[in-house]
Image (spheres, rainbow, N blue to C red):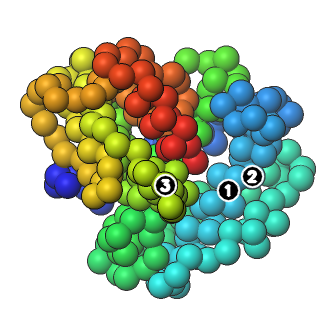
Amino acid sequence: MSTEVGLDYAGHLAALRGAVGHLVDLVADADPATPVPACPGWDLGALSGHIGATHRWAEAMVASGMPRRLPFDAFAADVPHDAGELTVWLLLGAQQLLATLESTDPDRPVWTFGHDRRAAGWPRRMLHEAVVHGVDAAEALRLPSRVDAAVARDGIEEFLGVMLHHPAILRRLKPAGEEPLTGTLILAAADTGEIWRVDLGRSGPLWRRVTSTADGDAVVLGGISELYLYLWHRIPAPTVMGSPDLVAQWSRATTL
């Protein structure tokens, strides 16, 4: 697997502050009953509740240095129902999360989604949680959205290096007692020229940066922000070359 190239800890914190502020601004004056097409069954109230509960859940783990994942349900149960209270609650939870992350040693041991069990992983994870759901909220409100190239690049590599090893995804990529999904998927950013290769099979998933799309069984080509949103299942594959079956199987396996 390649060394990840993206934002550093300070960069993640700065980008997280901006992404959370943007998300709060989007939902503050919006009707909480507005449906969110990207999250079937959710409205903006449910989206806000999920984000606020996630912030409190992550903050509790980082603040306590928990070596294992805390149950999420207790945090989700505290979501206020009043629209005005919900916005304030969302903002306060975001502020507490940021304060804790900014005052925490990035090397502090704590449970994370990836193999690297340090607090350094949490600003990054919360950044992409906020960015993706900010796109969801903007779509619900029929407003334009834009993902910065540096954030998209970092998010692509977080997905490939961390989230791709989420137990739910691994169970689909390598189902017990069955043959694993096998093949080489290439993600090519047409606007920046960057290319990522993902090798799937018994020893995978493994990813690295490459300089050519050669040897890929399937190539997904698009702008770097499009590739980011594609990995998070917010848009279809922009352009597919090679095996559409591999892309379809990858898409089904990597849904969270």
At x 69%, y 61%, the residue is: 53
Q: Position of residue 123 (x, y in %)?
A: 42, 59
Dot 3 amino acid type:
Glu
Dot 1 amino acid type:
Gly
Label 2 element class = helix
Q: Residue under circle 2?
A: 49
**What residue occupies the far right of the structure in this picture?**
82
Quadrant of res 80: bottom right
At x 19%, y 45%, the residue is: 208
Q: Nearer the viewer, residue 102 or 57?
A: 57
Q: Position of residue 42 (x, y in %)?
A: 78, 39
Left/right of residue 86 with respect to residue 243 in the rendered view: right
Mark 1 Cα shell of 10 Å, populated few (<14), some (14-19), many (≥20): many
Which of the two discs, 3 and 2, sits closer to the camera?
Answer: 3
Q: Residue under circle 1?
A: 52
**Mark nearer the N terminus (3 vs 2):** 2
* Dots 2, 1 in contact, CB < 8 A: yes
Q: Position of residue 75 (x, y in %)?
A: 73, 68
Mark 2 Cα shell of 10 Å, populated few (<14), some (14-19), many (≥20): many
Mark 3 Cα shell of 10 Å, populated few (<14), some (14-19), many (≥20): few
Q: Give the alpha-carbon distance from disc 3 to disc 1, as whole Å.
A: 39 Å
Left/right of residue 8 with respect to residue 128 in the rendered view: left
Q: Residue under circle 3?
A: 178
